[in-house]
Amino acid sequence: MNVPNPIRVRFAASRKRLIWAGLAVPLALLLLAAWPHTEAESRVPSPLLPPQLEWVGTLHSAADVAPKAGFLKRFIKKVVGLDDRKKAMLMPQGVAVDAQGRVLVADPRERVVHVFDAARKKYSTLHAPDRDPMLAPIAVALDSAGKIYVTDALRARIFVFRPDGKFSGTIGGISKNESIFKRCTGLAIDAQRGRMYVVDTVAMQVVILGMDGKVVSRIGKPGANGGEFNYPTYITVGTDGSFWVMDSLNFRVQHFSAEGKFLDAFGRLGDDLGAFDKSKGVALDSEGRLFVVEGRNDRVQVYDSSGRLLFYFGHTGNAAGEFFLPTGIAIKHDTVYVSDGYNRRVQIFHLRPDTATDAGAAGGR
């Protein structure tokens, strides 16, 4: 009678386990590649959106605009670590939309500007040279020629890129370690008047530049009176040349004429509807309504030019139409783009014709 050698039995069993383990890894990768992708943007939009808005979709990574790869290509990408979902936003801040419909999003955590080109099914990033890198891109704006301007809070200068994404130079730097800014954050461009408006948060000022980068004037000083600031952040400019500044730690929005004269202000500290607490981006729509991103309360509040609250949308969460510390905002052709910071995405909404102005009925938790 032949008695099996226990050493050979254990060896054979170990060999089988190794074989199965070797098969299990690619099998698991195959299943992962084929499994439906279920992120927040695939969920049903929040039913609490006001009637003025329609939820359109989200941008999170290259996979949202690039053509969907075949099964085999997705599998190979996962194996070698080239999954397009890794080309994703980590902390979206300022957002802008160019004439081609490309969505540009500043990401200080990734130290790049993400460029989503849905029409051409392309994704790319804007990088400055290694010798002069971006460290904390915050806001993005475009001029009439399609040039791209990006504020960098840590480098205290504006990085400029050609429409094709090639680095063109910087504005504001006096030397490698000196700048005309202390900490530039918000940015808006009035292409019609050839003016660039830069929020210098630490200097408590708005710096107005010509498109050649030369300083035209400086507005503001520390304080709480009209025309004074307490750590301002974002800015937007209207078709009439007047501009609105988020005066963050004074918990208000200030309105200035095209010449920089203080016109009005509204806002107060609080977490109730209409109040401000950690407010961020501001933008104007085609009807002159002012959209204010209320970061800590995870909503966007919409006002008329007198500061009357018209409606609002959003509440805390990660489903469609919900926010978690939203930051920047842009409006282009009645489409609203909101950087949803901790949800690592940009949410897109379409503005319908105005059907309600009562704030209590227009949105909510």
Image (cartoon, rainbow, N blue to C red):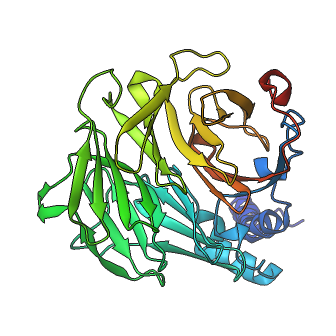
78 horizontally vs 215: left or right: right
Please report the residue visible at 32 percent of the width from the left and 27 percent of the height from the top: 230
Whole-percent x, y for residue 33 in the image: 78, 68
Give the position of the C terminus as an image quadrant. Answer: top right
For residue 39, say whether it is visible: no
Of residues 172 and 196, which is closer to you in this image? Answer: 196
Res 234 → quadrant: top left
| Quarter occupied by the N terminus | bottom right
Count the marks: how many? 0
- Residue 293 image position (x, y, % from top left): 59, 37
Whether 42 is drawn above or below 256: the answer is below
Residue 150 versus residue 241: which sits nearer the camera?
A: 241
Q: Is residue 309 left or right of residue 248?
A: right
Q: Is residue 21 left or right of residue 144?
A: right
User: Does any portion of residue 197 appear in the rendered image?
Assistant: yes
Q: Position of residue 93 (x, y in %)?
A: 50, 50
Tell me where residue 357 sits by quadrant: top right
Left or right of 297 in this view: 348: right
- The answer to which of 119 and 291 lies nearer the viewer is 291
Task: Please tell me which residue is depicted at 51% across the width and 32% down the height of the picture.
Answer: 279
Residue 288, position as x, y percentages in the image: 64, 47
| Above/below status of 195 relative to 227 | below
